[in-house]
Image (cartoon, grey):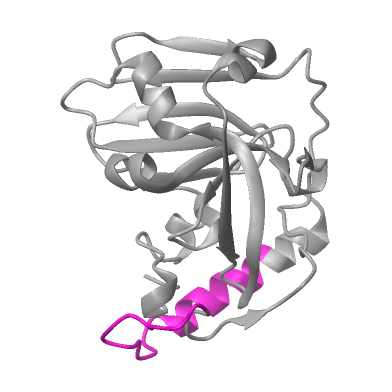
């Protein structure tokens, strides 16, 4: 990791520490734009200093943990799963939101239908090709997570997490891992990269829930 990105992470850690004691709205916003956000028309690029280049013939997604059928999906296996198109907004914790994104990908429910989570599985943990991690309750993943490989009718750009990234429209965007490599089903919650650095584990944009 470059010295610049180390400083970037340290700055975000300081923001998280400073934001812990700031008051948040007691009730969710009724507006399309969550509190503290501003709308952008472009799609800013944010990462940890690495943008892995993964040829489609080498891409794979490992799915393991508390499931009946551990699976490794290759690219053609992934495309053979039921595909859906969805339009949703995208909210970054760094205060910008982009409205009306057109996505194509695989709903997390289709993943669960394939691997059959065990009854004790309550959480999912995501690992990216460059080492980034994040987490979600299984309930939220089933409700809202889309594993995206197209954006605006084109292949998802590498800088935005292509070939495949997670998109969860109801929480801040860091909960959707770019360059997704592994999904692990867990009984107990496990904090990811930003969660252990002071960012909220629930990450609800509508209550300005940015920091733990």
On screen, residue 73 above or below 204: above
Percent of width and height locating residue 54: 79, 26
Q: Does residue 197 appear to the left or right of 45 in the view shown?
A: left
Percent of width and height locating residue 129: 67, 32
**What's the residue at 36%, 70% (across, down)?**
212
**What's the residue at 45%, 83% (across, down)?**
31
Give the residues drawn in magenta, as a range. 9-32
Q: Nearer the viewer, residue 8 or 62?
A: 62
In the image, farthest residue toward the left: 119
On screen, residue 146 above or below 57: below
Percent of width and height locating residue 46: 73, 59
Whether 12 is among the magenta residues is yes
Tell me if residue 137 can be seen: yes
Q: Quadrant of residue 93?
A: bottom right
Q: Quadrant of residue 45?
A: bottom right
**What's the residue at 16%, 24% (across, down)?**
119
Q: Does residue 71 appear to the left or right of 37 in the view shown?
A: left
Q: Quadrant of residue 21?
A: bottom left
Q: State how many labels appear.
A: 0
On screen, residue 50 above or below 29: above
Q: Nearer the viewer, residue 54 or 113?
A: 113
Q: Nearer the viewer, residue 134 or 86?
A: 86
Tell me if residue 131 can be seen: no
Percent of width and height locating residue 39: 66, 79
Whether 13 is among the magenta residues is yes
């Amino acid at each position: 990791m470059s010295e610049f990105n180390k400083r970037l992470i340290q700055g975000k850690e300081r923001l998280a520490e400073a934001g812990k004691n700031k008051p948040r709205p007691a009730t969710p916003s009724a507006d399309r734009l969550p509190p503290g956000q501003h709308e952008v028309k472009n799609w800013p690029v944010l990462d940890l200093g690495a943008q892995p280049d993964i040829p489609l013939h080498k891409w794979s997604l490992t799915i393991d943990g508390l499931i009946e059928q551990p699976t490794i999906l290759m690219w053609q296996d992934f495309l053979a799963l039921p595909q859906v198109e969805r339009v949703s907004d995208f909210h970054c914790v760094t205060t910008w939101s982009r409205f009306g994104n057109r996505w194509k990908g695989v709903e997390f429910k289709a993943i669960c239908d394939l691997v059959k989570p065990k009854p004790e599985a309550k959480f999912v943990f995501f690992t990216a090709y460059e080492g980034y991690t994040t987490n979600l309750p299984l309930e939220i993943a089933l409700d809202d997570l889309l594993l995206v490989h197209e954006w605006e009718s084109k292949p998802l750009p590498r800088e935005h997490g292509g070939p495949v990234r997670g998109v969860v429209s109801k929480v801040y965007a860091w909960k959707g891992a770019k360059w997704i490599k592994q999904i692990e089903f867990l009984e107990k919650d496990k904090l990811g990269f930003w969660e252990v650095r002071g960012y909220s584990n629930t990450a609800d944009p509508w209550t300005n829930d940015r920091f733990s």
